[in-house]
Structures are given as C-alpha cells and as structure tokens.
Image (spheres, rainbow, N blue to C red):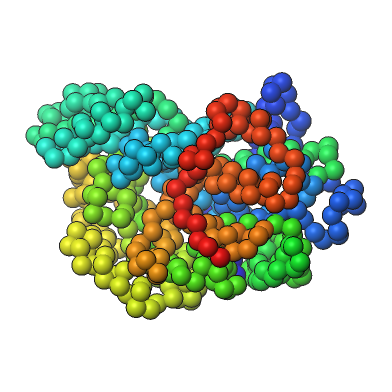
Amino acid sequence: MSTAADASPDRPACPPPDRPPAEPSGKAPEPSGRSADPALDPGLEPGMVDVLIVGGGVCGTALLFELARYTDLKRIALLERYDRLAAVNSRATNNSQTIHCGDIETNYTLEKALRVKRTAEMIVRYAELLDPPTRERCVFRTPKMVLGVGETECAFLRERFQRFSPHFPAMELLEKEEIAAWEPRVVLVDGDPRPEELVAIGIRSTYTAVDYEALTASFVDQARAAAVETDRRVDLHLGTTVTRITPDGEGYRVAVAPTAGCSAASALPAGEIRARHVVVNAGAHSLLMAQSMGFGLQYACLPVAGSFYFTPDLLRGKVYTVQNDKLPFAAIHGDPDVRAPGKTRFGPTALLLPLLERYRPASFWEFLRVLRLDWAVLAVLWQLLRVADIRDYIIKNLLFEVPWLRRRLFLADARKIVPSMRLEDLRFAEGYGGVRPQLIDKQQRRLLLGEASIPARPGLVFNVTPSPGGTCCLGNAARDLEAIVQRLGCRFDRARFERELYGDALPSSDAAPEQVVVAG
C-alpha cells in the first residue's frame, strides 16, 4: 500500500522557518523539532497515538498542523512512504502552483467560486502567520487574468464580470489596451495589436502562486513548534509504508514496514501502530487502501496526467484562458514558475494515463486494481468519447506526448495566449507534471470532478483530492478536524482557529470545499 511524498531529488528540502507562526502576542517559541518522551503521556497506552495521518503531501501535513496548533491531543503521527515530504502531487514540479479561488477559473459557477474562495483564503491567512523569509518561500504575488479571445469568449467574460465582481472586488475588466499594459506579449505582435477582439478579467496584485512543496514543509515545522516544551508529541516517519489497517475495538491497528529502497532515518521498522483515529490523505492510493478494506467499491479511478512546456520569460503573471464547458479538463494557461526564475510554464495537457504516479511504472498494477473495469466504467468512457469535443481533445493530447510532434501541436494552442511565440521558444518540461485521480461513480455512471471523502467507519476516513486539492488543503483539514474533535472529545481552540484561518468570520456549513461523501 502507499502514501503520498517531498522535494525534487535535485533540490534540497526547504530549510525550516526562522520561527513558527506568531502568537497573538507576536511571540512564539522557537521550534526544536524534538518530540516529548512517550513516558510523559499518561493518557495513552505505549505505541498508541490519538490521530494517525497517512500521507505527507500538502493535505496530510495541513491536518497535522491544525491538530497540533488548535487541539490538545497528546500524540499525533504522520506516515509518509517516501523518504521526503510532498514527492508526488504536492511536489513543486507536479502541479500548476496556483491558488484556485474561483475568480479566473471559468468552469466554476458563482456558488462554487464562493466556496473555493473561502478555503483558498485560508492559505493566505496561514502565510500571514509566518515570518517573512518562510512566507516568501511559500506564497507569491503576481498579477493574474483570464483571457477571452474572439466575440463569443469576450461576451462571456463581460457577463461573468457583472455577476462575479460584487463578490470579488479586486476584479478588473480589461480591454485590449489595458491587457497590453499588463501583459504586452499577449496583445502585441511585432509591436502591433493582434486583430482579434480581446477582453480579460484581471486581478492586479494578490497572492496567486504557491510552492506547495515549501508549504508542506512549513506545515510540519509549525506543527512541531506547537508541541515544543509540552508533553505532547508530533511524530513524522518518512520512508514508512502502510500495509494494512485493521479495526481494533474503537480504534485501529495499522501495520507498517520500511519502504523498500528508502533511506529515511525516521522510517519505522516492521510492526504495528495503534491509533484512535486514522485519516488517509494519499491521493489515488487512498482509494486503493479503502477498497482493500471493502469500502468505496462503487468507485473507479481514472488518472489524468498533465504535461507542461517551458518558454523564456514571456509573461509577467498568470494568464488563463476560457474553459470549454464541454471538457472536464483544465484549459491551457501560462504561469511564471516559482522554482525556475526567468521561465514561463505553459500547460497543462491532459493525458489519460494508466498509472497512479506519473514516473513510477510499477503503479500500473495499482491502477488496474482501482480501475475496477466493468460495464459501468466502459459506459462512462463511452459517454466521454461520444462527445466530439472530448474525443478530439483526448486524441490531440495523446499526440502531445509524441516527441517530434508535440511542440508543433502545442504551439498552436500556446499562441492563443502569446501570438508571437515561436517554435524555438518552446521546450518540453521533462519530469514535470503529476497525475490527478479523477473518480468514476459506477452507480450513477458519471465522472466526478470534485474531491471525495470516504468515511469508511467511525474514526477512519480516506480522502482522494485531485486538483485543486492543494488550494483546499486547510479547508479539507478543517472538515477532518471537526470530525476528530467530535469523536475524541479533545479541546479545540475554535476562537483562535477562526481568528487565524478564517479571519474572525465564523465558518458556515456551506463553506466547506466541494466534495463527494461516499457512504461506507
């Protein structure tokens, strides 16, 4: 079985922050990274933890942070099968590095945009708790816009602006001249304006980009800081694979073993951990684990991989394009890469790939186990392929993977954003792009595009978080935090939580991230 994972192998992990998030007084203890002696915990049996989190990506570590900072749980542990954090979809190279808050994502309804906006703002509020050097490693300010090209798209954006701008006051409606002032290469070709009608919705200056890898590291540092000089423990075990989860009274026995080939010093030896509550945040592997226990069997997984292309520094900020509402995939966009100064990253493409992890061929066999191919799955695939736009899109994205052909095909799409782009400007981003686990509901015979939470039984939940799961990491964690507090009866500093992460606003019942809850 598996969990999630950290930093690119050719880069060191982000250094720890200079200090943890500021307390209301403006002072906080320095994190030591040490855990308390287990003998100091009289409330737990040896080898037992209050909450065990499986998966060390941005969602798992967000929950670790919230439990450590806002509850009085004595012992919290996180297991990650790789020897570093955020090595799969939270890795900086494997996602679009974007805070998706619904303002320029044209596939979001107003209702969904307002829900996502609330959870997206939690990342910004969290970042404001950090010291400046750490904050500057995690979140980044850039302008952003969604670009409409041609009469139909421009009319759509004008109408959308009228509906959305009262709820997103930072929005600006940009005509061609204003777009050129923000992003000259979007409008100008050899110094002259491009002939098409152009309109954009822009946000001038806000936190728009995230290094989710660095954010993951900061969550762990701040979780450890919360336990300093207390009898509480926050344990992190890298290089540890979960092989089985077994109910044990009101808790669980979790069988673990060192991950083959990993050299993490914190890896646990083969054995068992007893936990009162278990949350699995392991991407597509969450479904694999759930189904191995007989839960979530009405679901199949359809992995969608995204590839990217690099160009020289062509854009000043993020430029998105209008989504085709017939396509359940992200439209092409251009972003300054937070880990590659002086380069703009364009993409993603969308490739149906029979792997749970993009660059791990052995995950093909895991894919077959969660595909659960039957007539219901085939019916959903047929529903997709019978739509001409989707069928043509899938075929084109297959061709995007052909080495000689892909740059030439992608150039035509990229020129919608930068019309003067040349073939020599484009370089395929080798090693970039992750896999998003899109779920198929076999009972309703439809593709699900939101996040899924499978509450298997009391105290055991499996979360599957495709994009934009990173944006909603703190919101998803808040949902699990509420369930843990209710079940375990621990103290929860709700006032502090709401003040720091919701900005003094009381979270309402409709503010949760869009999700699918699957009955056990």
Reply above or below: 428 against 416.
below
Q: Residue furthest left?
A: 195
Q: Position of residue 368 (x, y in %)?
A: 45, 76
Quarter of the picture containing the N terminus is bottom right
Q: Quadrant of residue 189?
A: top left
Side of 219 relative to 315 (left or right) = right
Quarter holding the C terminus is: bottom right
Is any part of residue 39 visible from this angle? yes
**Residue 54 in view in this figure:** no
Question: Looking at the image, is 288 positioned above or below residue 110?
Answer: below
Give the left or right position of residue 261, taking residue 355 as reference: right
Residue at the (40%, 77%) spot, across then down:
373
> In the image, what residue occupies the spot 45% across and 31% down?
207
Q: Nearer the viewer, residue 220 or 346?
A: 220
Q: Is residue 411 above or below residue 320?
A: below
Q: Is residue 140 left or right of residue 54?
A: left
Residue at image position (50%, 43%) is 512
Q: Which of 501 and 434 lies nearest the eye of the viewer? A: 501
Percent of width and height locating residue 111: 37, 39
